[in-house]
Image: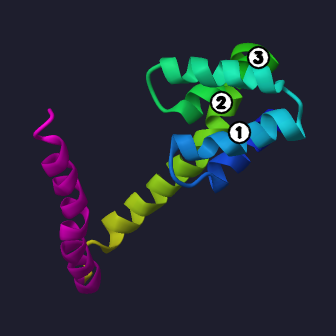
Amino acid sequence: MKLFWSFLEIGLFGFGGGQAMIPLIQEEVVELNGWLTREEFLEFFALGNTLPGPISTNMAASVGYKIADPLGATVSLIGLTAPTILAMVLLLTAYLRFRDVRAIAGFLRGARPVVIAPLALVVWQFAPSA
């Protein structure tokens, strides 16, 4: 159960994607709980980088598996991803309910260029070398 709560906390407070969660995972699994040594953590980090998918979920599954076999991996992954899944469901529900409200529709139309511009910039910058 401690495994679930530890990774739930990381999922709640780990803003910035998978790489940004690594220091939180290290603090939780090495410093606070002693589930891994620093050397083991570095080995798991290297392994997580070689596997497909986000490093944070790879680390959660690896640590969970070491602590409590397949059940531990499952519990860790659920804890880590539950906050994101819940936020997505709540935002989608709010969107579907309020998308026809004039102010919300206007906001979403205005947000499109803000989302598209950084994506276009990345394409522009990487297109010559791709």
**Looking at this view, is 95 or 19 the one in front?**
19
Mark identifier at residue 25: 1
Mark identifier at residue 66: 3
- Which residue extends farthest front? 129
Circle 1 Cα neighbour tier, 10 Å, few/some/many (<14 / 14–19 / ≥20)? many
Give me the residue at 69% from left, 15% from top.
Answer: 70
- Mark 3 and mark 2: span between their CA atoms? 10 Å
Q: Amino acid at mark 1?
A: Ile
x then y, percent, for residue 57: 57, 32
State the extent of the magenta-drawn residues as a range.
Answer: 102-130
Circle 3 Cα neighbour tier, 10 Å, few/some/many (<14 / 14–19 / ≥20)? some
Q: Amino acid at mark 3?
A: Lys
Give me the residue at 57% from left, 26% from top.
Answer: 58
- Which residue extends farthest bottom? 103
Quadrant housing the C terminus: top left
x then y, percent, for residue 96: 32, 64
31 to the left or right of 110: right
Circle 2 Cα neighbour tier, 10 Å, few/some/many (<14 / 14–19 / ≥20)? many
Cβ atoms at labels 2 and 1 below 8 Å apart = yes
Residue 87 in the image: above or below residue 45: below
x then y, percent, for residue 52: 44, 21
Residue topped by disc 2: 60
Q: Amino acid at mark 2?
A: Ala
Q: Secondary structure at mark 2?
A: helix
Label 1 or label 3, whichever comes before in sequence order: 1
Mark identifier at residue 110: none
x then y, percent, for residue 54: 49, 33
Coloration mode: rainbow
* Residue 95 picture quarter: bottom left
- Mark 1 and mark 3: span between their CA atoms? 14 Å
